[in-house]
């Protein structure tokens, strides 16, 4: 390290590979002081002006904001807040074109300026040396400072480092042609810059502080040397002018001779690089409590009549700046959005990008607006490219500051060979554009690299996503398989249980256990059955059989013959039973529910309670049940029809019965829902069928009970016997119908 | 005699080396990366089933067993080329049934119309749909692969495929938009 300092003291520096000497064009603006502009009418502040994430909004439309008031807050360490550059009213928060080569829109805050420029209360810090490190870092973070050299990396992260720092390098090179913003800032604000450097010194405590400045800024060099003459630690290093000296890695190489490894950060070698404008912003923020709300912007190019550096509030539309510097816009019609017919370039001529809309605002990283005329930059006016074949002259690799192989990269980029590009260290390219500048074939090399870089990044994202999709797919497959096995097991158990009970039934009809079960079921289903039997009977019978048969399919083949026998028996029985029950129920219906209210009630119940048996059957989509769907409707209609026929009045009874039935059904539905909830959703269909099976059984028992009840009632009422017989005979056809349908 | 010795010596040497090679092939046997895994790695993992197989892995298995390589619509020409390279077969144009791939999309549920039938949830190969019976469903955009398998089962047609909007994050430099800035 000593040798480094010795060399620096002797004004000997290292050299980085390559580099170019484009015409500087800095004299257009370097001689004039930084001008203050009148406030624009409106400011447009993009929420995100830096690398990382945008902060969370703190304000809403219609709020009055004071100068320096934070508009967003950062919850993420990579987020940087933005502040109101002047006082005014927030007129809109919407998407607007931002300073990005894509010309895409992002969320922006629009402030209507009130021209009062009222500050929010500030705390001016008299002596920053008394502040603790954390206090300073908090101030820097709250002031929204992001690297002002171009990339916009959040400064509070860069200065909040643990490892020992050997060198703090202040980047004052400003190597790109045309730009003089830092130059003028150093001339006019050298004291404040030195204060900022002292604050950084306090934070990072480096062994040495090196200010790297190109020798084409004599005034700034003098000002800095004057301001630092008493400070031993700070060395002003005057470097030969060469593009891109201001590149971070290049500057480190020149000053210290160290090369930052591919993919590594300078901090790993104990070096921190800060831009000189960032130092000024830090001193403003820590000492004067002024957040980052303004910056020096170079307005230059021969299309401007008054090129000059200006203090621009962040969010100032470029159109306002161009107006103030005498830009002859060629879009006089106010109705159409201003189109940049003559090119406007944000950033320098080598690394900048064309802006497509003059409403683009100044952001934290915009250091230059370049409006060239046709003679000084003809290529910017050409729509098409004059690109011709590569002649393999090798000039590009001679000038590449990252020692890459630009022509090989170009071929691979054209072939979209991402693997080869990564192998050729494409990501070490700093986008400086030196290769494109020297290319005699006018190949826009750097644009190819930008495209390729974006593609590779996107491909990486897609790879991550597809890997995630694969994992999710595999997980789903595994889950489905597990569920299938569980289901089959359950079916087997259920089928076995059913078989056992059925055997008992067919053998004796009433064992002790079934009697108990029947009794229990009777109590439960009593009332519910009353209203259900009518429209369920047909449905229950036919669907029950189907479900049974479908449920029994997975059972081993040896059991099947028995099953079928049992099935047949029960089929016949149940058909007869059902027919009788239906008839009885109808009679009951005639007697009790002679008014439409009951029906609506019943409908309500069935419709609103998803787990009531009929509903389940309707909801389950298994094909076996589909033909049955029509049946409840039919029976319903019939019931209605009959009810309409004979309007014998038994309103009160019916109403009470219906109400009780509703309550019961609801309670039951609830209980069932609870039962169902813990089970996974996708197996629902199967569960539904099984529950339908058990439900059906219950319902059948209930139906039997209801029958008995109905009989009793019917005896009491003793009405219209003949009519009943007719109905029964007509109804008896339906089971055959349904069995035919099967 | 000399001839015999020469034959004998050469024969011995041949036998020796043969034995060494034979031993080495058993001892240092390398389990080659199974071809199915390699094909699967090339497929886009949308699990869309447009190839007629229930997912990318099954299609990879089918390709390894001689199925046509041009059935992956989301992968497009690129994937076909890669698989052709891997398998050493000719590149075929994308299967006619699958042409018209319109760039990346993501499913979107029009939530006012959703009846909560869970059919789309069952159709989604990557569990990217959130919802329950009788509850409104919604798509996890980050997990959706844009396979459009959920569109067909929806009984009320409330799912549509929307192109992924262009943002700063996924924007691609357009070569023709930027003129090269060059000084004289």
Image: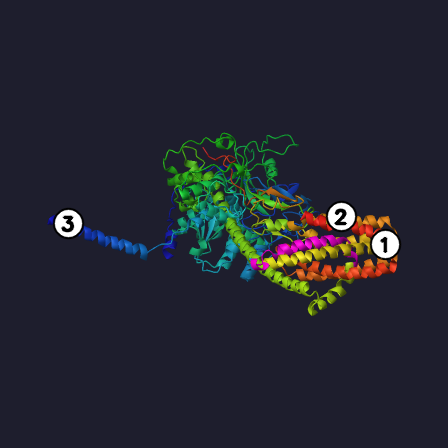
Q: Residues within 10 Å of mark 3 (few under 14, many from 20)?
A: few
Q: Secondary structure at mark 1?
A: helix
Who is closer to the viewer here, A14 or A284?
A14
Residues rendered magenta in the picture: A530-559
Q: Secondary structure at mark 2?
A: helix
Label 1 or label 2, whichever lies nearer to me, is 1
CA–CA distance in space, label 3 to label 1: 120 Å
Q: Chain of mark 2?
A: A
The numbered disc on residue B6 is 3
Can I make out residue A449 in this image?
no
Q: Residues within 10 Å of mark 1 (few under 14, many from 20)?
A: few
Q: Chain of mark 1?
A: A
Label 3 or label 2, whichever lies nearer to me, is 2
Q: How many marks?
A: 3
Q: Secondary structure at mark 3?
A: helix
Q: Position of residue A203 (x, y in %)?
A: 51, 59
Q: Is residue A557 magenta?
A: yes
Q: Position of residue B119 (x, y in %)?
A: 63, 49
Q: Residues within 10 Å of mark 2 (few under 14, many from 20)?
A: few
Q: Residue at x 85, y 54 (%)?
A: A721
Residue holding disc 1? A721
Q: Earlier in the sequence, mark 1 or mark 2?
A: 2
The numbered disc on residue A634 is 2
Q: Chain of mark 3?
A: B
- Residue B133 in the figure: left or right of residue A387: right
Label 3 or label 1, whichever lies nearer to me, is 1
CA–CA distance in space, label 1 to label 2: 23 Å
């Amino acid at each position: 390290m000593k040798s480094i300092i010795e060399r620096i003291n002797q004004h000997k520096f290292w050299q980085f590979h390559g580099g170019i000497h484009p015409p500087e064009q800095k004299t257009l603006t370097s001689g004039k002081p930084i001008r203050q502009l009148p406030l624009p009418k409106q400011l447009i502040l993009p929420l995100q002006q830096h690398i990382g994430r945008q902060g969370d909004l703190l304000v809403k439309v219609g709020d009055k904001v004071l100068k320096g008031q934070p508009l967003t807050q950062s919850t993420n360490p990579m987020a940087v807040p933005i502040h109101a550059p002047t006082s005014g009213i927030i007129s809109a928060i919407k998407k607007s074109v931002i300073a990005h080569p894509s010309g895409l829109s992002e969320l922006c805050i629009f402030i209507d300026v009130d021209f009062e420029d009222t500050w929010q209360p500030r705390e001016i810090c008299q002596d920053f040396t008394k502040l603790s490190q954390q206090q300073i870092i908090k101030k820097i973070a709250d002031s929204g400072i992001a690297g002002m050299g171009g990339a916009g990396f959040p400064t509070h992260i860069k200065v909040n480092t643990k490892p020992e720092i050997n060198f703090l390098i202040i980047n004052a090179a400003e190597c790109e042609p045309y730009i003089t913003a830092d130059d003028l800032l150093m001339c006019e604000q050298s004291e404040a810059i030195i204060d900022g450097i002292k604050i950084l010194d306090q934070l990072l405590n480096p062994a040495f502080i090196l200010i790297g400045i190109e020798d084409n800024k004599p005034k700034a060099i003098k000002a800095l040397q004057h301001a630092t003459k008493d400070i031993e630690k700070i060395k002003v290093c005057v470097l030969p002018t060469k593009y891109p000296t201001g590149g971070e890695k290049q500057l480190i190489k020149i000053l210290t001779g160290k090369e930052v490894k591919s993919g590594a950060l300078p901090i790993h070698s104990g070096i921190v690089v800060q831009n000189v404008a960032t130092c000024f912003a830090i001193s403003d923020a820590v000492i004067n409590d002024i957040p980052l709300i303004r910056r020096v912007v170079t307005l230059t190019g021969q299309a401007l009549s008054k090129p000059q550096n200006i203090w621009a509030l962040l969010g100032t539309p470029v159109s306002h700046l161009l107006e103030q510097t005498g830009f002859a816009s060629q879009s006089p019609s106010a109705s159409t959005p201003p189109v940049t017919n003559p090119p406007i370039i944000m950033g320098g001529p080598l690394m900048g990008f064309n802006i497509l809309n003059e409403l683009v605002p100044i952001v934290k990283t915009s250091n230059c607006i370049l409006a060239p005329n046709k003679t000084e930059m003809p290529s910017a006016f050409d729509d098409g490219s004059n690109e011709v074949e590569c002649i393999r002259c090798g000039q590009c690799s001679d000038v590449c500051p990252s020692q890459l192989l630009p022509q090989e990269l170009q071929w691979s980029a054209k072939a979209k060979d991402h693997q080869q590009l990564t192998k050729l260290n494409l990501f070490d390219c700093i986008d400086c554009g030196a290769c494109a500048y020297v290319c005699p074939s006018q190949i826009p090399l750097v644009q190819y690299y930008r495209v390729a870089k974006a593609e590779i990044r996107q491909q990486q994202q897609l790879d991550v996503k597809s890997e995630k999709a694969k994992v999710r797919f595999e997980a789903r497959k595994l889950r489905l398989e597990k569920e299938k096995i569980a289901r089959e097991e359950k079916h087997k158990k259920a089928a076995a249980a059913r078989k056992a009970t059925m055997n008992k039934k067919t053998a004796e009809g009433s064992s002790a256990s079934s009697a108990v079960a029947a009794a229990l079921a009777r109590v439960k289903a009593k009332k519910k059955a009353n209203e259900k039997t009518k429209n369920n009977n047909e449905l229950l019978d036919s669907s029950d059989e189907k479900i049974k048969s479908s449920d029994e399919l997975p059972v081993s083949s040896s059991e099947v013959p028995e099953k079928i026998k049992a099935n047949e028996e029960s089929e016949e029985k149940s058909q007869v039973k059902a027919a009788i029950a239906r008839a009885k129920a109808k009679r009951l219906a005639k007697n009790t529910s002679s008014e439409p209210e009951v029906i609506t009630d019943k409908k309500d119940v069935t419709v609103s309670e998803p787990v009531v048996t009929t509903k389940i059957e309707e909801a389950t989509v298994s094909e076996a049940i589909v033909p049955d769907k029509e049946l409840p409707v039919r029976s319903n209609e019939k019931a209605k029809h009959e009810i309409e026929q004979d309007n014998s009045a038994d309103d009160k009874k019916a109403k009470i019965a219906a109400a009780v039935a509703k309550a019961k059904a609801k309670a039951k539905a609830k209980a069932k829902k609870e039962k169902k909830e813990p089970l996974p959703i996708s197996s629902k269909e199967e569960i539904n069928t099984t529950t339908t099976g058990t439900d059906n059984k219950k319902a059948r028992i209930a139906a039997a009970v209801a029958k008995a009840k109905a009989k009793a009632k019917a005896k009491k009422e003793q009405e219209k016997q003949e009519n009943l017989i007719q109905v029964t005979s007509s109804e008896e056809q339906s089971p055959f119908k349904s069995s035919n349908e099967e | 005699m000399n001839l015999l010795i020469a034959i004998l010596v050469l024969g011995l040497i041949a036998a020796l080396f043969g034995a060494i090679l034979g031993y080495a092939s058993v001892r240092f046997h390398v389990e080659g990366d199974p071809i199915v895994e390699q094909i699967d790695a090339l497929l886009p993992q949308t699990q869309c089933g447009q190839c007629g197989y229930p997912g990318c892995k099954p299609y990879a298995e089918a390709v390894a067993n001689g199925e046509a390589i041009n059935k992956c619509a989301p992968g497009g020409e690129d994937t076909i080329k890669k698989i052709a390279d891997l398998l050493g077969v000719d590149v075929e144009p994308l299967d006619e049934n699958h042409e018209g791939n319109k760039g990346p999309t993501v499913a979107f549920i029009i939530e006012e119309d959703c009846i909560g039938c869970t059919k789309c949830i069952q159709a989604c190969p990557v569990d990217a749909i959130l919802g329950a019976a009788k509850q409104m469903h919604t798509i996890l955009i980050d997990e959706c692969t844009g396979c459009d398998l959920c569109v067909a089962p929806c009984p009320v047609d409330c799912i549509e495929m929307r192109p992924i909007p262009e943002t700063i994050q996924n924007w691609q430099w357009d070569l023709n938009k930027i003129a090269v800035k060059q000084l004289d």
